[in-house]
Amino acid sequence: MAEGGQAIFKALDNAKTQSYHFKAIVIAGMGFFTDAYDLFCISAVTKLIGRLYYYDPTTGKPGAFPKEIKNAVTGVALFGTLAGQLFFGWLGDKLGRKKVYGITLVTMVGCALASGLSFGSSAQSVIGTLCFFRFWLGFGIGGDYPLSAVIMSEYANQKTRGAFIAAVFAMQGTGILVAGLVSVMVSKAFLAAYPAPPFSESQVLSTQPQGDLVWRIVLMFGAVPAALTYYWRLKMPETARYTALVQGDKKKAAADMAKVLETDLTVDETSNKVDPKSSYGLFSSEFAKRHGLHLLGTSTTWFLLDIAFYSLQLTQNDVYPASGLLHKASSMNAIEETFHLSKAMFLVALAATVPGYWFTVFLIDRIGRFIIQLGGFLVMSICMAILGFRFYALRGDKCKESKNKEFCNGNSELFTFLYGLTFFFANFGPNSTTFVVPAEIFPARFRSTCHGISAASGKAGAIIAAFVFQTYTQDDKNVKQVMVALAVVNMIGFFFTFLVPETKGRSLEEISGEEKDYGDRKTHPNGIDQSIVAEHQMV
């Protein structure tokens, strides 16, 4: 380790948990809250937009998106997210985490607001505008993935690093929860103000024109939490690990650390700077030898996980009728359907999604990342296999005699339980660990880039979910086969997990091999470099 560096990192790793750690979780977590809100709130309003802009009186059914339009609206943000993860991940290593962090937030705020606007009033102009701004919204969201994870990992102490990174990611669950809650509140308010008969009684009057405001308000609300954290993001100092290991300035790293942690480090003025370019590069054979399998492991597991996770998330408004949580569309008016769909989203998030995230937070530094990821993939695979092979028996048959129920003669309780259990073990499992581990196992100068590559691989899986699996599930005959296929995907993820090392209880420099990269200096028995002049706790 370069002179002075070991003491800085040792002080970070051994720092007691204090207020700034929690402040960093909130600042980074609110960005993830917005990320999840913006990506998933679209599920709450797609049926409403379909009723408003794609009603065809010749069908005798409520308006609905054509398959291609539905895939585009729900999936276009994923393309932007993939691009943002790669671009901002690379930029975070080139310019620094702090400099890029504000850019992603401004992009999210502006595009979240613009998503609720439209140029023109035709279906083509409204959907075109929505897709355009949601792509760039996804681009900003993509940048938040590697930056939030890496910033938290480089600020955290060694003992609770996994919990801190997982807590940032757990705000995704809160974002999903609030997406459902905001949709419930907005739709309920509009439903009370603008009542209408169900579609079965009046095909035209059942779709309130005021519903056009409902989906816009829901989408634009995503800008609020992000805007509230902008000032604090600008005030965050650069991480000490980036300053020391990438910029090579240990003195500035110590000074930056002293601003936020209750530790004061003074580094010898003659301490040499590290030249970060003196070691191997990202596309070198040395990187492939040291971290090639790690990158393959983090990328493939995230890719496979997101195929399954986003298939469930993006198709939940179709699954809820099968679980008994949502009545027939024809038995409700447009805003009423949005209300009940949003309520179902909220309940599933509250009962299954959010608890899974926080189980990971509390247990990840006790039982480790590896066991949580293996167990999550295994249980998801079992649940999806049962849902697949017993799908029609659990869901039931189409109800022709009932005005409200979509399906009859099934086992909706067991169907809902298995669906919720899959969500729980996705979040108390690979959905959390695939976010945590790439922020720990790579060297500082590649950490943001490699996390971005891993995350972008995940979004490639999410795109497959949105444009392939979601297309198949729109045909009732294919749902069983899709569920079985997702069970196989999860089992493949189970085996690829063995490429990813356990990082629990180890320092970032030990995991990444940076302890050896710059050569160990003479140290005292307690591991503190002789180049440190003073280290003391601030009073």
Image (cartoon, rainbow, N blue to C red):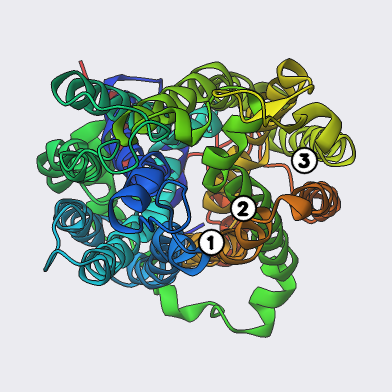
Q: To which residue does mark 1 refer?
A: 459
- Residue 390 pos. (x, y %): 88, 34
Q: Amino acid type of disc 2?
A: Asp
Distance, label 1 to label 3, CA atoms, is 18 Å
Q: Which of marks 2 and 3 is nearer the N terminus?
A: 2
Label 1 element class: helix
- Residue 125 pos. (x, y %): 21, 70
Q: Amino acid type of disc 3?
A: Phe
Q: Which residue is drawn at 64% across and 75% down?
A: 287
Residue 87 visible at all: yes
Q: To which residue does mark 2 refer?
A: 306
Q: Residue at x 16, y 38 (%)?
A: 224
Q: Which of marks 1 and 2 is nearer the N terminus?
A: 2
Quadrant of the frame with the C terminus:
top left
Numbered circle sitting on residue 377: 3
Q: In this view, does 122 lie above or below 169?
A: below
